[in-house]
Image: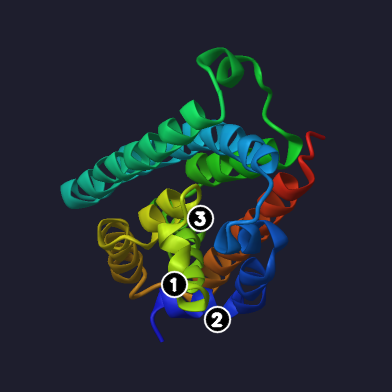
Amino acid sequence: MNTTAYLLAASAEIWKAYYRHPFVLGIQNGTLDKERFRFYLIQDDLYLEEYAKTFALGAAKAESLSSALLFSDYLAAINRERAVHGGYFEALSVCEEDLRTTPRALDNLSYTSYMLRVGYEGGEAEILAAILSCAYSYELIAKHMLSERPEAGSDPFYGAWVREYASAAYAAENEKLILALNAVTESASPAEMQRLRDIFVNCSRYELAFWDMAWQQKKD
């Protein structure tokens, strides 16, 4: 079993809960209240600011040029996500002032603070484990939506979100992260694998808390 498979097995029940979450189901079915989605988008944009810094730490700590380029290249995928945000921001009347003045919700702050701590204290493998729990979960969530409701991708409002995360381009970027994590952990010790498991499971739990936060529009 490679490292990614090991981490996914360790967090399987958490990931199954994503698919059943009312926020996720609301996007899938096209029924999610737009105020909830607006709250989520703003918080997600604030999240991406810190997420990008985690990739930057990965580039700084990379042990090879190829790893450094992997971390830096993935920032382009983050730009694609923000481009999708931009279309929704226009539709939902979110302005730069909103993004600048809205504080990070406590769950968002806790999650990003944890990721950055992993980035500062860990190395390549730890950073990849922290990043992958977010990046790959969005791909699987969007693909699961399409498997359950194929028309989710053509929904007049939420379809753009579904298509982005279910896209071949997004999956290709994730595949690079998966291959990199598996490669740098081929000779990892049991203690190192346990550390990666803890990080991945913690970030997976934070992902679930983020969906809860969005659903409840919870600020603190």
- Mark on residue 150? 1
- Amino acid at circle 1: Pro
Between 27 and 61, the one nearer to me in the picture: 27
Within-10-Å neighbours for mark 3: few <14, some 14–19, many 20+ = some
Residue 50 coordinates in the image, percent (x, y)? 51, 34
Callout 2 amino acid: Ala
Above or below: residue 137 compared with residue 80: below
Name the residue: 33% across, 36% down: 79
Instruction: Tell me: residue 132, above or below residue 15.
Output: above
Q: Is residue 91 left or right of residue 60?
A: right
Number of the front mark, 1 or 3: 1
Q: 184 or 69: which is nearer to us?
A: 69
Q: Nearer the viewer, residue 164 or 3?
A: 164
Above or below residue 214? Residue 9 is: below
Q: Does the rendering let one see residue 6?
A: yes
With 109 as the anchor, is 218 left or right in this view? right
What residue is rendered at 67% in x and 58% in y? 208
Q: CA separation, marks 1 and 3?
A: 23 Å
Instruction: Sort mark 2 into few (<14), some (14-19) or many (20+) by Cα contacts within 10 Å.
Output: few
- The residue that mark 3 highlights is 134
Q: Position of residue 129 (x, y in %)?
A: 47, 60
Element at label 1: helix
Residue at left 50%, top 73%?
149
State which tag comes first along the sequence, 1 or 3.
3
Label 2 residue SS: helix
Q: Amino acid at mark 3?
A: Cys
Distance (Cα) linking label 2 and label 3: 16 Å
Residue 216 x %, y %: 79, 46
